[in-house]
Image (cartoon, helix red, strand yellow):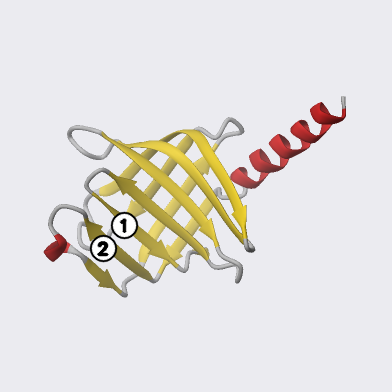
Amino acid sequence: MRFALVFFMAFTLTTSFAQDFNGEYTSDYTTFKDDHNPENNFHEASTFYVSVEFNENNYGFVTVQDPRIPDKVLIYEVSELVDVIEAGGNRVFSYRASAIHLQDPLDTQIVFYYNSENRFKLLVLDDQGSQGFHNLVWM
């Protein structure tokens, strides 16, 4: 019974916290890493708009408005919570997703990261590389 209560509390807290991601954010800095062509890697101080919408089952969408392609919103369909890691004051929430803005949707990992200083980041990873959106601030 005690195990069931602890499991229920942990599940409820994790689900509740994941729902707290819902909202509109700005990011003032991005990094991009191309795993196949390092010459494409970059760091850029620019405003990005990020929107997060999850339901109680950790299904939802993350969208990013990239200033370099203003007519195309990057859309990631999130299908499930994969892992939650807490260590050293840092919290990492990893989700399975799909980059549905691409002609051929690509399996993607969405990672939300709170560091020990309560700085909030979004990381989008796939088998081609990764892009981080740093210093997310609720709008």
On the rendered image, what quadrant is the N terminus found in?
top right
Residue 36 position, x and y percent, is 15, 52
Task: Kindly identify which residue carries mark 2.
Answer: 67
Q: Could you say whether the residue bearing mark 1 is in a helix, strand or loop?
A: strand
Residue 43 position, x and y percent, is 27, 71
Q: Nearer the viewer, residue 53 or 32?
A: 32
- Residue extending farthest to the top is 1
Res 119 → quadrant:
bottom right
Q: Is residue 49 above or below residue 53?
A: below
Residue 33 horizontal side relative to residue 1, left or right: left
Task: Kindly identify which residue carries mark 1.
Answer: 131
Residue flagged by tag 2: what amino acid is it? Pro
Residue 17 horizontal side relative to residue 130, left or right: right
- Residue drawn at 29 percent across, 49 percent down: 73
N-terminal of the pair, mark 2 or mark 1, is: 2
Residue flagged by tag 1: what amino acid is it? Gln
- Residue extending farthest to the bottom is 45
- Residue drawn at 21 percent across, 39 percent down: 102
